Image (cartoon, rainbow, N blue to C red):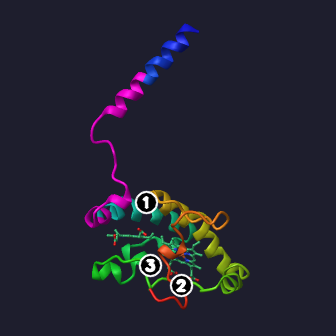
Amino acid sequence: MKRVWIAVGLFVAACGGEGDAPDVEPIAWKDMSFEQRDEFMEDVVLPRMTEIFVAFDASFEGMTCATCHGDGATDGTYAMPSPQLTVLPGTEEAFIEKYETDPEHARWSDFMFERVVPEIASLLQVPRFDPVTQTGEFSCYNCHTLEGVEQ
Ligand code: HEC
Ligand code: HEC
């Protein structure tokens, strides 16, 4: 019994020490400057998202900033959503009709919903939009534009 207590005590002490160490606090995406975001995209987002996309379809092997940002990657604004990505249907009915009934399209929307959105939301540490609870913010429309909606 006593040994366990000692072990717990040591563990807690070790943790406390680590927490006190300076400059270990990473900057959250929302607090990053444009330059820091640029660097974070290059070092973390692009490599990780390339893995995710390639696992789905090998043709994404040569994925670049422009795969998501379109012209924003060449003009340097990196503004999102990107009008060069597939424009998604503007109504729920049209969306279901196109992306949930046809299996070839459904494959894509499932991949986006199950892999892409959760992964990038977690990299950027922003809550993903949950259609069931209607909470969170990061969704398909942080990347894709919506039919009939002026951006
Ligand atoms: C998988 C898709 C994806 C890829 C690949 C990607 N980005 Fe991004 N990027 C995003 C999204 C989504 C946002 C917007 C996040 C948000 O809503 O805050 C963003 C935002 C940015 C921003 C911030 C823009 C602003 O106005 O604050 C910069 C800068 C940026 N990206 C640069 C890059 C660079 C450089 C690369 C390539 C090394 C890259 N991105 C690759 C998805 C991507
Ligand atoms: C981080 C950015 C990002 C997010 C978030 C995202 N997508 Fe995508 N999506 C892409 C990229 C990049 C492609 C490949 C280029 C293209 O086809 O437009 C793509 C392709 C697609 C395609 C394939 C179009 C086709 O037929 O070739 C569909 C459908 C799609 N996305 C739907 C969605 C849906 C639905 C969501 C939300 C659940 C979503 N996407 C979220 C970046 C994103």
Disc 3 Cβ-to-ligand 1 distance below 8 Å: yes
Placement of 68 over or under 5, stated as above or below: below
Question: Looking at this rendering, what residue extends furthest in the right direction?
Answer: 101
Q: CA distance from mark 3 to mark 2?
A: 9 Å
Disc 2 crowd rating (10 Å Cα; few below 14, some 14-19, many 20+) is some
Q: CA distance from mark 1 to mark 2?
A: 22 Å
Q: Position of residue 4 (x, y in %)?
A: 55, 14
Q: CA distance from mark 3 to mark 1?
A: 15 Å
Under circle 2, the secondary element is loop
- The residue at 54%/8% (across/down) is 2
**Would you say the magenta stretch is mainly helix, strand or loop?**
helix
**Region in magenta:** 13-38
Residue under label 3: 81
Residue under label 2: 146
The quadrant of the rendered image in which ligand 2 is seen is bottom right
Question: Looking at this rendering, what residue extends furthest in the bottom direction?
Answer: 148
- Res 108 → quadrant: bottom right
Is there CB contact under 8 Å for labels 3 and 2?
no
Residue under label 1: 124
Q: Amino acid at mark 1?
A: Leu
Disc 1 Cβ-to-ligand 1 distance below 8 Å: yes
Placement of 16 over or under 103, stated as above or below: above
Quarter of the picture containing the N terminus is top right
Q: Amino acid at mark 3?
A: Pro
Under circle 1, the secondary element is loop
Q: Nearer the viewer, residue 66 or 11?
A: 11
Disc 3 crowd rating (10 Å Cα; few below 14, some 14-19, many 20+) is some
First reached walking from the N terminus: tag 3 or tag 1: 3
Placement of 82 over or under 127, stated as above or below: below
- The residue at 39%/28% (across/down) is 16
First reached walking from the N terminus: tag 1 or tag 2: 1
